[in-house]
Amino acid sequence: MPNKPYPARPRPSLSALALWGGVAAVFCIGLAWGRYPVHLRELLRILAHAAGLPVEPDWPGVLETVVMQVRLPRVLAAMLIGGGLSVSGAAFQGLFRNPLVSPYILGVASGAGFGAALGILLWNSPWLIQGSAFFFGMLAVTAAWAMSRLYRSAGPMIIILAGVVVGAFFQSLLSLVKYTADPDDKLPVIVYWLMGSLSSMTMERLLTVVLPMGVCVLGLLLVRWQLNVLSLGDEEARTLGVEAGRLRLGVIVAVTTITASAVSVSGIIGWVGLVVPHLARMLVGPDYRRLIPASLALGACYLVLIDGLARNLTAMEIPLGILTASVGAPFFAILLGRGRTGWA
């Protein structure tokens, strides 16, 4: 019996090619769109000059500052975080065979939120806040995994229940930190951080999460054919030569690292990892060999556009979590109303 149930690689479809073309277009839109608009020709020349091509820099200096130092870190971060959360959501939905699962299901958001709030309360240093958020996010999922191992006979879905328990515990600790925070100084910072934003993104902060997120996203791309097998159940996976327990642990570690890294630099941006995989499934189908790359591309485009709206809709920047929930919740309601249950 062959080791792989899908030996032939899928050929690139028109929808997949259109998605990746859309990523390039949205990247340019994100850099050009703003209160200080940049013409496409000038944008391409600035990018070419930054890449070392022989282009005469005859544009205003402020234009290059806006593109390279203000917008470029935000757009790259939005693409990395949106794509990472979307891939994580698609992987978890296949892993647990549940269309309502998101990357935050195992308590990473509550743990990271508590860690960031604790960092704001005690230190108020961006690097310590980011490190504390990442540590407690990883700790929350580790606790959920350890709790699930105590009830191995209950089946793999027990880890979701353990994640709910751990998430509720860290949510209570977060409420305690908010209760003790100074309402005129610390509390507004904590509340704004929890709503998610890329307003303080710099290239230095982005570089701290590129490596862990990039490696884990690549790992999920490499095992995407195995997610097809795992979505059929553990018995079928073992029959086809896939070690379900080891794969499940590897996917959980990768998704947790991606999600904790994203939350540590951007705050909690909900609904991306829940809604985007469903939209990608509508475009390319349930085959994870196509679904994971499509989720990556679509998630990157989605969060760049949402961040653009957050920057430009009103005079004051809108937190990303508000917009993703405002867009994601109605879309998911429409999805449920149309009865799209063939998700895997």
Image: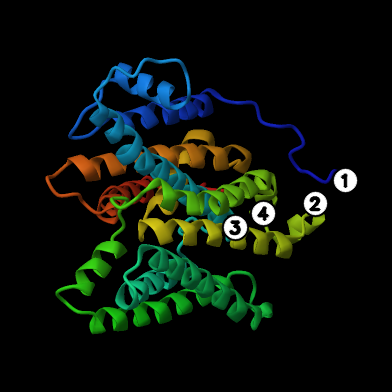
Mark before the other along the chain sequence, 1 or 4: 1
Q: Position of residue 142 (x, y in %)?
A: 57, 74
Per the image, the residue denoted by label 3 is 254
Q: CA distance from mark 2 to mark 1?
A: 8 Å
Quarter occupied by residue 55: top left
Q: Which mark is residue 240?
A: 2
- Quadrant where the image shows the N terminus: top right
Q: Closer to the observer: label 3 or label 1? A: 3
Dot 3 falls on a residue whose secondary structure is helix
- Dot 4 corresponds to which residue? 232
Tell me if residue 234 comes above or below residue 63 in the rendering. Answer: below
Residue at point 12% right, 45% down? 315
User: How would you rate the neighbour count of disc 2 (Cα within 10 Å): few for under 14, some for 14-19, many for 20 or more?
Assistant: some
Kindly check if marks 4 and 2 are in contact, taking CB atoms under 8 A apart as contact.
Answer: no
Please state if 157 lies on the left or on the right of 22 as rendered.
right
Crowd band around label 4 with a 10 angstrom C-alpha radius: few (<14), some (14–19), many (20+): some
Instruction: Give me the C-alpha separation between circle 3 and circle 1.
Output: 29 Å
Q: Amino acid at mark 2?
A: Leu
Q: Is residue 180 visible?
A: yes
Mark 4 vs mark 2, CA separation in Å: 11 Å
